[in-house]
Amino acid sequence: MPVIIQSSEMFSYWYSVVAIVLLSGIFTISTDAIAIYPDCKTLGKYALRPKIREFILVKVITAEPIVNQPVSITPGYDCILEGIARIELDRTQRSNICTGAGQLITEKFEDAKLPGYKRKDFIAKAVKSFHGSIGKMGVTGQFGCNFAADETKYKIACVFQERPRQ
């Protein structure tokens, strides 16, 4: 004997299914979000302050070359690359190196520290100047950045790692 489902029961059924799908999506996203915000405490005094790291991370993963990708994944943040970026801040020459794990692309940006020129504005300007390297890294790559400021200027260095094509 066939089961007859009334329209109100059908509505409740679909409402429940949609709610479960949405909730599972939210929990997946929040778990992933936790995974992409490492603390990098192992870098000691060379680690970025967490709020600066978070701001840089958000600027990079929401940059135009990443957002315009047809997939919904984002590059990962890597503490080792943050440490390399710290070294790059003090380096006077550009250093792009290749490894078996993929090419490391370094970017540096400096600007005068003027009255009213906020750290966040500087970081946003720097990340925009890195769009070419962010595009090369792509959504499957990873990156790490470091930041420094003195009385006269802001400096940022980021290291982007492309994933080798399989």
Image (cartoon, rainbow, N blue to C red):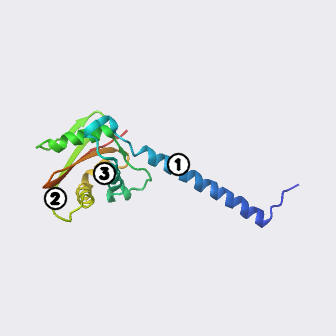
Q: Residue 15's spot in the image, x, y percent?
A: 68, 61
- Secondary structure under tag 3 reads helix
Q: Earlier in the sequence, mark 3 or mark 1?
A: 1
Q: Earlier in the sequence, mark 3 or mark 2?
A: 3
Choose top left, top right, bottom left or bottom right for residue 110.
bottom left
Which is more toward the observer, 17 or 55? 55
* Residue on which disc 1 sits: 28
Of tags 3 and 1, the one toward the viewer is 3
Q: Residue 127's spot in the image, x, y percent?
A: 26, 56
Above or below, comparing residue 95 to residue 24 in the picture = above
* Residue on which disc 3 sits: 52
Of the numbered discs in the image, which one, if any, rests on residue 146?
none
Alpha-carbon distance for marks 1 and 2? 40 Å
Q: Which of marks 1 and 2 is nearer the N terminus?
A: 1
Choose top left, top right, bottom left or bottom right for residue 83.
top left
Residue drawn where x is 77% and y is 66% of the image: 8
Q: What residue type is labelled 1?
A: Thr
